[in-house]
């Protein structure tokens, strides 16, 4: 059996590695709410292909507590996806371009509903 990079990435993202176990040249630290989160930037999967146009309730659920994106064993809520995909972060080049408009629309929907 041959494992592809996607399969290896998926398996390794389910396992939590301590910061000391991450190669320093690949380690990124981001602020997620009140916590700092360390991960290996080479192990971030492409953005999940999920659309909420017919599942607004699902958007509300996934915004703060999502299992669509798992990085270093941690579930990453949709509200934090820019920390992993924006070009200014220096990795996953082009990924944010693919989802930024939709992510922005999701944020506006949540702002309107909750304000």
Image (cartoon, rainbow, N blue to C red):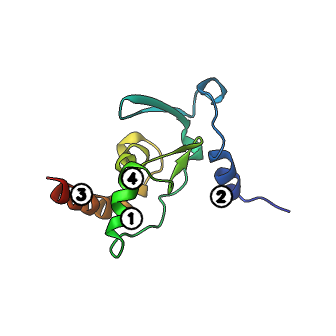
Identify the residue at the far top of this view.
20
N-terminal of the pair, mark 1 or mark 3, is 1
> Which residue is found at the position 59% from the left and 26% from the top?
19
Q: Which mark is residue 6?
A: 2
User: Counting other residues with Cα less than 10 Å from the Cα at mark 1, is it few (<14), some (14-19), or many (20 or more)?
Assistant: few
Rounded to the nearest angstrom, the CA distance separating label 3 from label 4 is 12 Å
> In the rendered image of this protein, does residue 101 appear above or below residue 17?
below
> Which residue is found at the position 54% from the left and 41% from the top?
41
> In the rendered image of this protein, does residue 61 appear above or below residue 27?
below
N-terminal of the pair, mark 1 or mark 4, is 1
3 and 87: which one is in front? 3
Residue 6 falls in which quadrant of the image? bottom right
N-terminal of the pair, mark 1 or mark 2, is 2
Rounded to the nearest angstrom, the CA distance separating label 3 from label 2 is 32 Å
Residue 99 falls in which quadrant of the image? bottom left
Q: Residue 58 carries which label?
A: 1
Identify the residue at the far left of this view.
115
Question: What residue would you read off at disc 4?
Answer: 78
Question: Foreground mark, 4 or 2?
Answer: 4
Question: What residue would you read off at disc 3?
Answer: 110
SS type, badge 3: helix
N-terminal of the pair, mark 3 or mark 2, is 2
Taking the image as shown, residue 57 lies to the left or right of residue 2, namely left
SS type, badge 2: helix
Taking the image as shown, residue 57 lies to the left or right of residue 15, namely left
């Amino acid at each position: 059996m041959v494992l592809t990079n996607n399969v290896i990435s998926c398996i390794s993202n389910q396992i939590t590695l301590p910061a000391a176990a991450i190669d320093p040249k690949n380690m990124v630290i981001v602020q997620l709410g009140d916590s700092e989160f360390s991960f290996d930037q080479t192990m971030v999967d492409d953005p999940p292909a999920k659309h909420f146009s017919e599942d607004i309730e699902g958007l509300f659920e996934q915004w703060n507590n999502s299992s669509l994106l798992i990085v270093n064993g941690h579930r990453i809520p949709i509200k934090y996806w820019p920390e992993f995909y924006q070009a200014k972060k220096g990795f996953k080049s082009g990924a944010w371009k693919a989802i930024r408009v939709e992510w922005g629309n999701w944020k506006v929907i949540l702002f309107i509903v909750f304000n």
